[in-house]
Image (cartoon, helix red, strand yellow):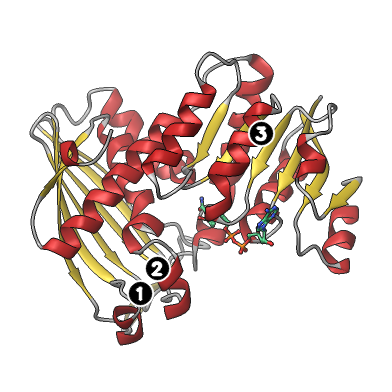
Amino acid sequence: MLRIGIIGAGRIGKVHTQSICNYVRDAVITTIADPFITPELEQWAKQNGIANTTKNYQDILQDPNIDAVLICSSTDTHAAISLEAIAAGKHIFCEKPIDHDIGKIKAVLNALADTSIKYMVGFNRRFDHNFRAVRAAVEAGKVGKVEIVKITSRDPNPPSAEYAARSGGMFLDMTIHDFDMVRYLSGEEVEEVFVHPAVLVDPAIGEAGDVDTAVITLKLQSGALAVIDNCRRCAYGYDQRAEVFGSLGAAACGNDAASNVQVSAANGVTGEKPLFFFLERYMRAYATEVEEFIAAVVNDTPVPVDAAAGLEAVRIGIAATVSSKEGRPVKLAEIEA
Ligand SMILES: NC(=O)c1ccc[n+]([C@@H]2O[C@H](COP(=O)([O-])OP(=O)(O)OC[C@H]3O[C@@H](n4cnc5c(N)ncnc54)[C@H](O)[C@@H]3O)[C@@H](O)[C@H]2O)c1
């Protein structure tokens, strides 16, 4: 039985905790750490059968009985806690992104070199049943040579301007998932990024120095092209679709809804809206993600999303940020590797 510590009990820390408690047989969470732990959170941990709560994640790192940690704290803590967890010999699942600073991510990669520590990054969309089926079709050669990847990624509601100001910007906070999806679905590396940014939803986001809408074109190493369209507001919910088009055909997936029932009447045909946001749409994907991390540790097999994938998505996010600010195509070669 693998013993796990959770570092950070906010939105995503709770999701991963519930997934492990509800779905994973090979692992048990022994401790949850969060500096702002409340009596309600302690009660919630107890209800989920978790023996210990602490305000100090060092209690997890120093516990010789804990084999693996999930780093679910705020982004600015990920790289430092990763380094300490590596030094403590723990296997690590780290939420995205590892950091916004390439130097700090490389320090994590360097610390991992020559260790047998498993280090996985939380790009949960790779575990979504729809996107996996698209990737499987591409991998099986059903679309032939990949020529165009199209991703639509729109959030239901914009974040506050305060959040936008400290998020690292839309490309490193939100689009980073789409950059990883382009790499995952195509199986290719990105060579160039060109962003058309806009502030169309909330002027306060623009005043905070960020954007809320963008169309992004990417050139891939084979010469194939990708297009991502992002918006921080979508009237009908969370819009998450993808298509890979190639020489032999296309593989595409739409949104998930609570049901696929259509009501047909004299005044038209109606159906369910897409599931509201990431906690609804990707709940099963989050569970598969932690299951596969734990399986990689237990069976000593490679993790499905490694630290190098975490670095690459951030490099593309930085290139997109430069392109957005300077209004020009940016080659990935310009960004530190
Ligand atoms: N993969 C995804 O779909 C996804 C979704 C949401 C968030 N995230 C990522 O997960 C991370 C957390 O996001 P969130 O939305 O859960 O944020 P959140 O603010 O809800 O939770 C973060 C928690 O970390 C705690 N924390 C801060 N410093 C800590 C420390 N030193 N030790 C232990 N706990 C600490 C905070 O008290 C808070 O409870 C972010 O990096 C975010 O990018 C990923």
Secondary structure type for disc 3? helix
Amino acid type of the residue tagged 3 in the rendering = Ala
Residue at point 75% right, 46% down? Answer: 57
Q: Closer to the camera, 292 or 9?
A: 9
Q: Quadrant of the N terminus?
A: top right
Secondary structure type for disc 1? loop
Labelled pair 3, 2 in contact (Cβ < 8 Å): no
Where does label 2 land, which residue?
A: 155
Residue at point 30% right, 86% down? Answer: 203
**Above or below: residue 324 compared with residue 99:** below
**Above or below: residue 162 compared with residue 281:** below
The image's mark for residue 85 is 3
Q: Is residue 132 visible?
A: no
Compared across the picture, whether 143 is left or right of 328 comes to right
Labelled pair 1, 2 in contact (Cβ < 8 Å): yes
Neighbourhood count class around disc 1 (C-alpha, 10 Å): few under 14, some 14–19, many 20 upward: some
Q: Closer to the camera, 205 or 48?
A: 205
Residue 143 placement (x, y as % from top left): 19, 31
